[in-house]
Image (spheres, rainbow, N blue to C red):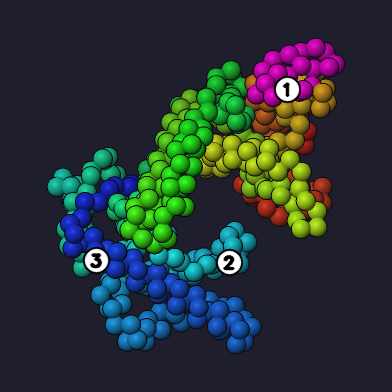
Amino acid sequence: MKRLQAYKFELMPNGEQSRAMRQYAGCCRVVYNKALAWQNAQYQADNTFKFSYTKTANLLPQWKTELTWLKDAPSQTLQQSLKNLESSFRNFFAKRTEFPKYKKKGMSDSFKFPQGFKIEQQNNRIFLPKLGWLRYRNSQAMLGTPKNITVSLKCGKWYASIQTEREIEQPRHLSTSMVGVDVGIARFATLSNGQVFTAINSFKQKQAKLARYQRALARKVKFSSNWKKQKGKITKLHSTIANIRKDNLHKTTTRISQNHAMIVIEDLQVSNMSKSAKGTMETEGSNVKAKSGLNRSILDQGWFEFRRQLEYKQAWKGGEVIAVNPRNTSRTCPCCKHVAKENRLTQAKFECVECGYSDNADLVGAINILAAGHAVLARGVTVQQDRTMKHEPTEGIRKSSREPVGIPRI
């Protein structure tokens, strides 16, 4: 089977190369925005949306004549930005993302080379068209054949993301165990075998420092030199928060994936769970401050990224991830199967009102998730099939997920 894998390295350009890369990123941003504006104008003219890379690529020579500095950027990077816009429209029409937006300076500045580059790992350098040879921090061994390179700017540093392709044998997981995973806020992840992964809460750790930086930014003249320096500090702190969270997620998912061939998780709709409670002008929301704090804590955990990493790591190792219906997993007694809201009166403790069984609430949830996963394997029904049979709406449901109806006795 073919495996596509990306490796990210920090680049070490000189001053001239750094200025050129900023210019290339700006050229790609301008071309992207001009193509989006052209498509919007076409829609207003004939009320049809049929974005085509070929049509916009034919406009590139005209745009280079109008804006002569576009010629300084490599043509393939400009063409690639148009392909990225085409992909954005495809995802929008497939209802996977929102309508494409105009790009802003300083936000996700990047450009891509699909060909024409060279990599010398033994000499720790990369050759990019019009830029020449650049040094990079060779932090890990790269396997496979490089297919393309994306150069991006983050917190004042340039990074190269190299996508590789290689043939591997069909993987077979070394473990034979199956485990249920319950994610939470007090405990990041609790496994059905009793193993607990504590929450890092990287945003909460840096929240006071971030607020201090933001207050200092508010006292400065907008767009002044000191304002830009302070804004750079805030951006760097946000990057630190994200890196801490990402590091913890990778370590946790790697440990779980290495030790278990079958992982059962809840099919959580994180975007719905973290919606604001402010309400509307007509009907004001209730408990807005408490819900805001809960939303902040939920997003600080990175549950969606946790699921994404588990899925691709299990696929690489030959395992599988099953997503089940989260309904009543924390209210069902694993002993007598009695379902009641009163079974869990506190966040941490579960006590069945029917049979008296008591344990940690997160552990009970993980046990019930594992039982639901066994039901999915027994029935072989996916989320999409199950909802279709019940004539329920299927919008927003990931087709790769699976869920059972209720929690069975085992």
What residue do we see at 28% from left, 78% from top? 69
Quote the CA–CA distance across marks 1 and 3. Answer: 58 Å
**In what element is the residue under mark 3?**
helix
Q: Which residue is mark 2?
A: 99
User: Residue 64: percent from the left, percent from the top?
Assistant: 33, 83
Front-most of residues 353 and 49: 353
Q: Amino acid at mark 3?
A: Ala
Whether residue 215 is visible: yes
Point out which mark residue 108 bears: none
What residue do we see at 46% from left, 27% from top? 255
Q: Is residue 21 above or below residue 41?
A: above
Q: Which residue is mark 3?
A: 20
Based on the picture, tell me whether residue 356 belongs to the magenta stretch.
yes
Q: Few, some or many C-alpha atoms within 10 Å of disc 3 (few <14, some 14-19, many ≥20)?
A: some
Q: Earlier in the sequence, mark 1 or mark 2?
A: 2
Quote the CA–CA distance across marks 1 and 2. Answer: 42 Å
